[in-house]
Amino acid sequence: MKNKELKQFRAGLESCKSMSSKVGYAVGKNMRLLEKEVEYLYTDARRRPEGWKEYEEKEITLIRTYAVSFQNGQPFFGDNTPTFNTELQKLQTEYKKILEADRPMQLEWEKFMDEESSVELVKIKQSDIPENATAEQIYALDPIIEN
């Protein structure tokens, strides 16, 4: 399993928390392992240049100022689009050196996220899965089912 797949896998395990003791144990153990790993991947492993936080805060302020709504978590600017784009361009120009310094860090992180994870997941046998398990649960458990 690749590093970039761990966050989604952990979220999928949520649907399996109340399963039988053997499966429930493996799910709980894996969720704890993955919680630490996912936190590392999205904080410590993701380096940013000095000054990035300030840029990011200003970008968020622009989005909140000009977004008229949010659709599926994405900002929608409507008639404010031209003004937002102009202000964002100014901000990006002001922080050009920081954005340029971030690009190689971003590429390095993306490469790392595409690598196979070193997390040793607790496995279960297919026979341990309860008969009343839903398709969603079986799909979520698939990476930890021993063949």
Image: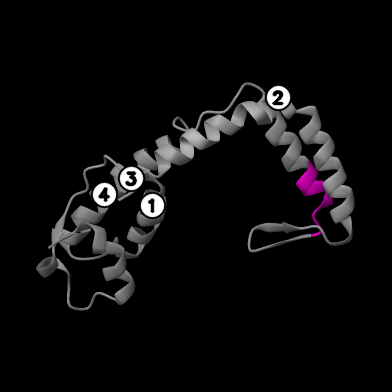
Q: Describe the element under mark 2 as helix, strand or loop.
A: helix
Q: As displayed, is residue 13 above or below residue 1?
A: below
Q: Which residue is mark 3?
A: 34
Mostly what secondary structure, the magenta segment? helix
Mark 2 surroundings within 10 Å by alpha-carbon count, few (fewer than 14), some (14 through 19), many (20 or more): few
Disc sitting over residue 5 in the figure: 1
- Give amino acid for label 2: Lys
User: Of the residues shown, which amino acid type is indicated by label 3?
Assistant: Leu
Count of all numbered marks drawn on residues in the image: 4
Q: List the residue tagged with mark 2.
A: 97
Residue 31 as seen in the image, left or right of residue 41: left
Is residue 134 highlighted in magenta?
no
Numbered disc in front, either 1 or 2? 2
Q: Are marks 4 and 3 in contact (CB under 8 Å)?
A: yes
Give the vertical position of 106 relative to 140 (above or below). above
For the residues labelled 2 and 3, the Cα–Cα distance comes to 35 Å
Kind of residue at badge 4: Asn
Q: Quick one: 44 or 1, which is closer to the camera? A: 1
Question: What's the residue type where badge 1 is placed?
Answer: Glu
Q: Mark 4 to mark 3: distance in Å?
A: 6 Å
Circle 3 SS class: helix
Observer-side mark, 3 or 1, equals 1
Magenta segment: 62-68
Tell me which residue sits at (25%, 58%) in the image.
143
**Residue at the spot x=38%, y=52% of the render?**
5
In the image, which disc is placed on residue 30?
A: 4
Mark 1–mark 2 Cα distance, whole angstroms, equals: 31 Å
Displayed quadrant of residue 144: bottom left
Could you give the CA–CA distance between mark 3 and mark 1, rounded to whole angstroms? Answer: 11 Å
